[in-house]
Amino acid sequence: MMSLCCEVVQALAGKSLVTAESITGGCIGGAITDVPGSSRVYKGGVICYTDWVKANILSVDPRLLDQHGAVSAPVALAMADGVRTLMKADAAVAVTGLAGPGGDDFGNPVGTVFIAYKDETVEQVRQWLFRGDRDQIRRQTLEAALRLVLKYNTTVSDGGKGL
């Protein structure tokens, strides 16, 4: 994981990144800040484990939460937009999902995860269905979020392959 975090920090040189974390509870920010020099790119994050924090701190429209649920593409995108605006960053990644023990009222099973990335030119959200126990699902979410950031911040020197 450390090498992936190092790649992300290097790829973001000259840019700032922020995080909005629900399912991971701060693990993404923790992993990034394990990298020496990460303060040059990582500004911080918001752990938004409840709908109240999503709505009142990240400015996620409560109607999105009511209509789609916290574990949804529209909410993940709104979280990324909200944290990017709040912290005045170049890029943001947001994660929301279900690590267990149960699903939600919208029919999402355990392992459902939405990860959103937003910068000035890209607005992307992806859905995953991870398998495993709570810790495994959270680890897979962490890795997928880092890879999504890396995908949109890979330099031309890699031949444009990205991931």
Image: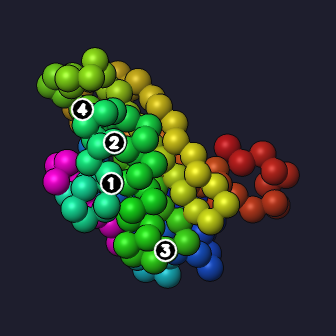
**Please, is residue 46 above or below residue 117 in the view?**
below
Mark 4 and mark 2 in contact? Answer it, CB < 8 Å: no
Camera-nearest label, 1 or 3:
1
Numbered disc 2: secondary structure: helix
Numbered disc 3: secondary structure: loop
Check disc 1 and give the amino acid type.
Answer: Val
Q: Nearer the viewer, residue 76 or 140?
A: 76
Q: CA distance from mark 2 to mark 1?
A: 7 Å
- The quarter of the picture where residue 57 lies is bottom left
Check disc 3 and give the amino acid type.
Answer: Ala
User: What percent of the width, then of the height, locates residue 65?
Assistant: 28, 41
The label number, if any, that marks residue 64 in the structure image: 2
User: What percent of the width, then of the height, locates residue 98?
Assistant: 26, 32
> Would you name the residue on which mark 4 appears?
99
Range of the magenta residues?
A: 44-52
Circle 3 crowding by C-alpha within 10 Å: few under 14, some 14–19, many from 20: many
Mark closest to the chain's N terminus, 4 or 2: 2
Q: CA distance from mark 1 to mark 3?
A: 17 Å
Residue at (58%, 75%) from the top-left corner?
A: 15
The label number, if any, that marks residue 89 in the structure image: 3
Camera-nearest label, 4 or 3:
3
**Please, is residue 154 above or below residue 15 in the view?**
above
